[in-house]
Amino acid sequence: MPRINLLPWREAERNERKLAFLIALAAAAVCAIVVTFGVHLFYSALVSAQIERNDLLTTQIQLLDHQIGEINSLEKTKRKFLARMHVIEQLQRSRPQIVHIFDQIVRTVPPGLYLTEVSEKGTHIQFKGVAQSSTRVSDFMRNIDHSQWLANAELEVIQAGKGSPGSSFTLDAQVVSPKSAKPGKAAPPAGRVAANGGHGK
């Protein structure tokens, strides 16, 4: 005798399709979650790599800034050293110059005039003294202009003495090198000079 299936086959088929759909939906969700996690890991790796590069660049920039600071410090030290060398060279060159200048001062002071003070201000020398007459001061200025180490004599002050013969004067002259001095003019005969109130003869 044949067996007859009395179960509703349509309902069973519907349940099977529903189960298959749910399985496919779950599989799609799992795939989406896996893809999303993979993309997240990928971009997280990119961000981490970029952060590492930024940290490396920051470290290198700080190192370069430190090296630039050291270079600037060395440049300042170099400039100071060169400035000191320049000063030392100038002092070395000026050592014999002062001897020649004092020798020229002795040679340019005429009789009847004596100096009370000699002061140097850069490339200028200021003379203070007493002369028997203004003619002696003129002779002194003329001798300075003919000197090899002094030039451009300028009279600043001349005053007649009160109660004593002679006139006090203040005179300024420029220190020059023999190369810039006027050639062919010899210094006048030396006269005696006495500093701090000594009298010339």
Image (cartoon, grey):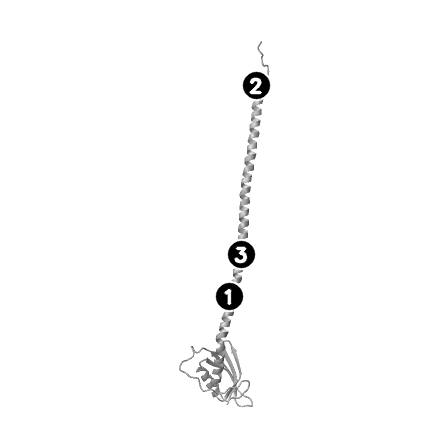
Which of marks 3 and 2 precedes in the sequence?
2
> Quadrant location of residue 41?
top right
State the mark number for residue 129.
none
Q: Are marks 3 and 1 in contact (CB under 8 Å)?
A: no
Q: Residue at x 51, y 80 (%)?
A: 126
Q: Secondary structure at mark 2?
A: helix
Give the residue pinned by disc 1. 79
Give the residue pinned by disc 2. 10
The amino acid type of the residue labelled 2 equals: Arg
Which of marks 1 and 3 precedes in the sequence?
3
Q: Residue at x 53, y 56 (%)?
A: 65
Q: Where's residue 50, x and y in %?
A: 53, 46
Q: Residue at x 52, y 69 (%)?
A: 84
Q: Secondary structure at mark 3?
A: helix
Q: Secondary structure at mark 1?
A: helix
Q: Where's residue 180, x and y in %?
A: 43, 77
* Rendered position, 16 above or below 189: above
Foreground residue among 93 and 10 = 93
The amino acid type of the residue labelled 1 equals: Arg
Q: Residues within 10 Å of mark 3 (few under 14, many from 20)?
A: few
Q: CA distance from mark 3 to mark 1?
A: 21 Å
> Quadrant location of residue 148?
bottom left
Q: CA distance from mark 2 to mark 1?
A: 102 Å
Q: Residue at x 56, y 37 (%)?
A: 37
Give the residue pinned by disc 3. 65
